[in-house]
Structures are given as C-alpha cells and as structure tokens.
Amino acid sequence: MLGSFIAVLTLRWPAGEGLGGRSRCDSCAAPLRWFELVPVLSFALQAGRCRRCGAAIPLRHLAIEIVAALIGGLALGVSPAAIGWAGAGFGWGLLALAVLDAEHFWLPDALTLPLLAAGLLAGLWLAPPLAERAWGAAAGYASLAAIAAGYRALTGRDGLGGGDPKLLAAIGAWLGWPLLAPVVLAAALLGLALALVDRARGVAVDRLTAVPLGALLAAAAFPIWLLFPTGAPALMLAP
Ligand SMILES: [Zn+2]
C-alpha cells in the first residue's frame, strides 16, 4: 500500500499536482475503482493495462510497489519490533527520495529534513545512540557540502545538487557516523558499475555526465542498515 502511495507521490509531486484527488488512469484520467487499486495484484489481473482505455500502466508503479514491499519485509525480518518498523520507515523514505532523484534529480527538503529529524528522534529509544546519530548528521552534511564548495571553487561549475548533503545528513542520523564512509563508498562503486553498464550499452558517459548521487546514496544506505540495524559494531568504534 505504501509502495502504491510512493509511486503516486513521486509522479504527482514533481508535476505540481496535489495528492488529494482520486486515483485515476495516467492516460485517460478515468477514476479507478477500489478493485483496480490493489497493489501488484490489480496490475497482474489487468495484465498491466487500464481497463477502459487499454493504456499500459507504467512498469515503474509495479517496480516501486514491489521494492516497497521488499523494504518492509526485509526490515521486519531484521526485527519485528520497533527497530524493524523504524528501519522500514527509513527505507520507504529513501525509496521515495531515490525515485525523485533518479527521475527528476530532485531531493526535496520536505522529505530529507523530516527523515533527518526522524532519525535523530529514533535515537532517543533505539540504537545507535543519539550522539552517534547527531555526529552522523553533522558529518554527512559537512562532508558533501565541503566537496560541493570545493568543486565549485575549482571548476566554476556545480558538481553536486543542494539536496545531496541533506540526504547524507539524514542517512547519518539513521546509521550513525561510523557507517557514513561505507555508504559513500558503496554508492560510488554502484555509480561506477552503472556507468560501466551504460558504456557497455553504447551510452556516452564522461566526467560531465549527470548522475543521481542521491539515488545511489539511498540504494547503498538501506542494505547497510539491514546489515547493521543498531549501528556500527563496536569494532569500528574502537580507537
Ligand atoms: Zn485509461
């Protein structure tokens, strides 16, 4: 259900449309009945097409619903208690941001900042402790903001979106500072792998090709939360 909501949110929000209206076909605008709104199942029963106009329902809806279900299932598999629900919320927030960044290079403050606040708030009850999270938020923001400022000073171009430091701050508020470097490393490796795939497919990729860094950070952060749902192991914190 949340996946379905995220699919609609990430479609209507960048288009400046409200969320209040009824669910409708993107093609013929016919309002959808309740049985056309069951996530994944309706898509399968209607063979991926609108019942009225026959237009193909974008595969992104199905993909987002499935990924959202996986996030919830994996997080609650880690722990069926509060920590699992918190992790699922973190994952769903990351999913919405990843979709917006991949499709629009947009990481709205209205999502990154509440995600950051929720991460700090969770630190009042759940590991990692608040201090580790607060340092994570500060270091996450400062590191990318410094890289963005340095790149701009050196090249006169913007190399990083303004939302990226805020997203890494939110990720730091959830995972704690010791896991920031692994997240950035995994995101960079993922980005390089995708660039190599693009090249292999004949897509031109050079040093000025825009890459949705936020989507890569989000895609790296959730698996690392799954591995370390209560923060970095003590080993990493030892001097
Ligand atoms: Zn239709």
Image: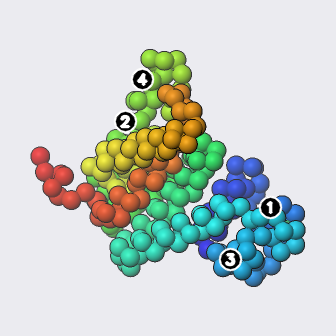
The residue at the point 88 percent across, 68 percent down is 53
Q: Amino acid at mark 1?
A: Asp
Circle 1 — which element? loop
Q: CA distance from mark 2 to mark 1?
A: 40 Å
Q: Is residue 47 visible?
A: yes
Is residue 229 rendered to the left or right of residue 121? left
- The residue singled out by tag 1 in the image is 26
Label 1 lies in ligand 1 vicinity (Cβ under 8 Å): yes
Is residue 33 rendered to the left or right of residue 128? right
Q: N-terminal of the two: label 4 or label 1? A: 1
Circle 4 — which element? helix
* Callout 3 crowding tier (Cα within 10 Å): few <14, some 14–19, many ≥20: few
The residue at the point 57 percent across, 57 percent down is 96
Residue in front for this viewpoint, 221 or 80: 221
Q: N-terminal of the two: label 2 or label 4? A: 2
Point out the residue furthest to the left here: 239
Write down the quadrant of residue 39 in the picture.
bottom right
Q: Amino acid at mark 3?
A: Ala
Q: CA distance from mark 2 to mark 3?
A: 44 Å
Circle 3 — which element? helix
Q: CA distance from mark 4 to mark 1?
A: 43 Å
Circle 2 — which element? helix
- The residue singled out by tag 3 in the image is 44
- The residue singled out by tag 4 in the image is 150
The residue at the point 54 percent across, 67 percent down is 68
Q: Amino acid at mark 2?
A: Ser
Residue 171 screen position, x and y as percent:
41, 51
Q: Is residue 137 visible?
A: no
Residue 183 screen position, x and y as percent:
36, 49
Q: N-terminal of the two: label 3 or label 4? A: 3
Q: Amino acid at mark 4?
A: Gly
